[in-house]
Image (tube, coloured by chain):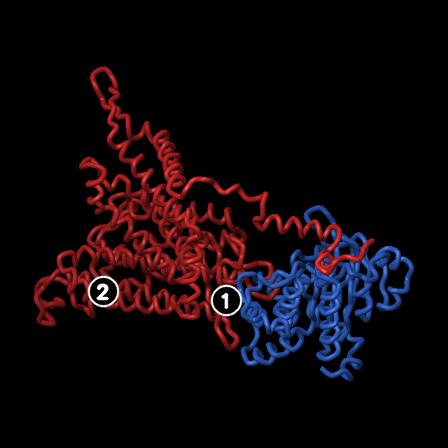
Chain colours: A red, B blue
Amino acid sequence: MAEPTSAAANRPEGAERLSEDRRDAMRGEPPFVEAPSEDTRLVRSLKEAAITAGLVAVLTIFFFAFRTDIAVGGLQLSLDPMLWITWVAVAFAARFALSYFVFAGERPTVAGWKKVAASTRGWPVGKVFGVVLLLVALTLPILLSVFLPSQNRYLLDLAILILTYVMLGWGLNIVVGLAGLLDLGYVAFYAVGAYSFALLATNFDLGFWVCLPMAGLFAAMWGIVLGFPVLRLRGDYLAIVTLAFGEIIRIVLLNWYEFTGGPNGILGIPKPTLFGLEFSRGEGSFSDFFGLEYSTIQRFVFLYYIILALALLTNFVTMRMRKLPVGRAWEALREDEIACRSLGINTVNVKLTAFATGAMFGGFAGSFFATRQGFISPESFTFIESAIILAIVVLGGLGSQLGVVIASVVMIGGIELLRNLTGLQAIFGAGFDPTQYRMLIFGLAMVLIMVWKPRGLVSTRSPSAVYKEKKVIGADLVAQGEGH
Amino acid sequence: MSAAQHIETAAEPILTVRGVETFYGKIQALRGVDIDVNRGEIVTLIGANGAGKSTLMMTICGNPQARSGQIVYNGTDITTLPTHDIMSMSIAQSPEGRRIFPRMTVMENLQMGAILEDEKYFDDDLRKVFELFPRLKERRGQRGGTLSGGEQQMLAIGRALMSRPKLLLLDEPSLGLAPLVVKQIFEAIRELNINEGLTVFLVEQNAFHALRLAHRGYVMVNGSITMAGTGRELLAREEVRSAYLEGGAH
């Protein structure tokens, strides 16, 4: 055999050589890459847009182009192509824009984002964002009355609603995000809290502040009641049982007429007072005491600060608990139950505390809901509520406190926003009713978020134990779906 | 514990297993097992796949519990105690398959090991673990799931050590590791035994390394102990060599 050249000498032999060749080939050398197309970017984008528009045209022809109306002797089929053509045009334009500006660039667009991300690394974005959010939340009533006085009341009401869901999300985050116990019946604790307060207040004439801790305790107790039978269950099986639990509570509330008022619900739930001062007109009221002019907005501001305080309490307790042994045990339980037991952790207690703590905050939120509405009925505690709360936790990123806030604002605020998108009528004609498409757009948004960020909006978790320096752990380091 | 003390107390049993029978449903996995682990010893249990080695380890931990027989640790009958009570009695286990917490950092994993201990020992224990496995110190902020197999095994042992055990149970620490890493791990176990006087009960398939490391060994076949003796004796025996060492002594 001839003396090999130096380059050839470096080449490995045999099987290793083969695998190396294969690896080289996979790297994108020909013939594994498609031949670059002859078309310019414009032509290619137009082609792709045309294909997309064609698909949309075929798929939607029966929904948009044809109309059935009730006529004499049955149904009458009429053709109404305008809506259909509009949608096809929208699809064409959207696909063209995507192909031309996003997909077909010389370089992947992602690279630019990576550069932006790299330049902000080492800068505590999450923390700064959290502080800004907190400041906005604390001053929101003032901001609203200064900048948007005309919609003040509506927006404040919406903020209260969002905060209620933030609190519920944080409560459920303890059970699902930290302890990894998939709970589809969280609304049960919300209902227990609401009904505890409503029944105590209407039957025994107790005020909000007395009932609040009691409602929390009742809910925590029910959390333990649910916890016991499901101790051995995990994952899908746990989900089914908790789902059933949520329904059982609702159906009991619906049918135990003598106690809960059944479908009629409970009326006349008292409003909260500020150290005995009521938010109403007349003697001994808040405005009378402080010499202010009475305005309904005062009560809204007060409610807003109550729910803000309750939500912040939830957050504070959760953050503290994450650093305590019990909170760390929750997270360890999510990771590996057998390893937990081998470390001498009593998993029964850990699970029950997770259920009880989560349920307690659900109960607090429930009493707040009852006092805000002044009326509750089983209607308010259907499965869809559990689903929305769970969606908030999952979209936000399991275990992330900030993620829950963002997801609540996006989901609850988004649903509200879609109610008012009358501007879209300019595009789709006067017959277009945006509220009908609300859930469709909402579902689409959820799908998009899950495609784009499969581990939720905020998918990093900061470790609770640090050795000198702190590091944020990226979700991309760990395979999807691990640790559930 | 110093080396001198270790010799004095060598014959005192810390763990006694007597006539233990364990079942998985109707299937009998252990058929009357007797084992003694004395204070300051490394004792190994070797055997083929499915012989019941891990079952014995799990039975000592109370999951599953023995249907008959008796397990005594440090003078206390632990046969019917729940797992978490057994594991909080200065016994630590590095379970089969390592079972570290994948999404938690190395530090958090170690902290989990010390979860039942007084906080005042933490810094000291952490320093010891980092001395034993310097690699863990380098990787302390990294997620457990992103460590290599050997590092994960070190973490599993380190986590077990954080609970200040007197008896360390190791279930197949060499599983799936490169020979060089296995050597490192076994070296660390030997160090722990000599320097700290830690008693180790080691379940292994890697008979050659395990028997060389151990003071005494047991051989398990089909749920029964068939041979017992010092590590050297067992290594020298023809039955052991042919069944467990042929082609494996590297």
Q: Secondary structure at mark 2?
A: helix
Q: Residues within 10 Å of mark 2 (few under 14, many from 20)?
A: some
Measuring from the top left, give residue A46's x and y in whole percent: 37, 38
Corner quadrant of residue A76? top left
- The reply to whether callout 2 and callout 1 are in contact (CB within 8 Å) is no
Mark 1 highlights which residue?
Answer: A328
Q: Chain of mark 1?
A: A
Which one is in front in this view, the residue at disc 2 or the one at disc 1? 2
Mark 2 highlights which residue?
Answer: A140
Residue A484 vs residue A435, the one in the foreground = A435
The label number, if any, that marks residue A347 in the structure image: none
Measuring from the top left, give residue A253's x and y in whole percent: 33, 47
Left or right of residue A88: residue A36: right
Q: Residue at x 40, y 70 (%)?
A: A123
Q: How far apart are the two marked residues, 2 and 1, measured between alpha carbons?
A: 34 Å
Q: Residue at x 32, y 44 (%)?
A: A441
Q: Residues within 10 Å of mark 1 (few under 14, many from 20)?
A: many
Corner quadrant of residue B74? bottom right
B211 in relation to A362, above or below: below
A116 in relation to A263, above or below: below
Upstream in sequence: badge 2 or badge 1:
2
Q: Amino acid at mark 2?
A: Leu
Q: Residue at x 33, y 45 (%)?
A: A442
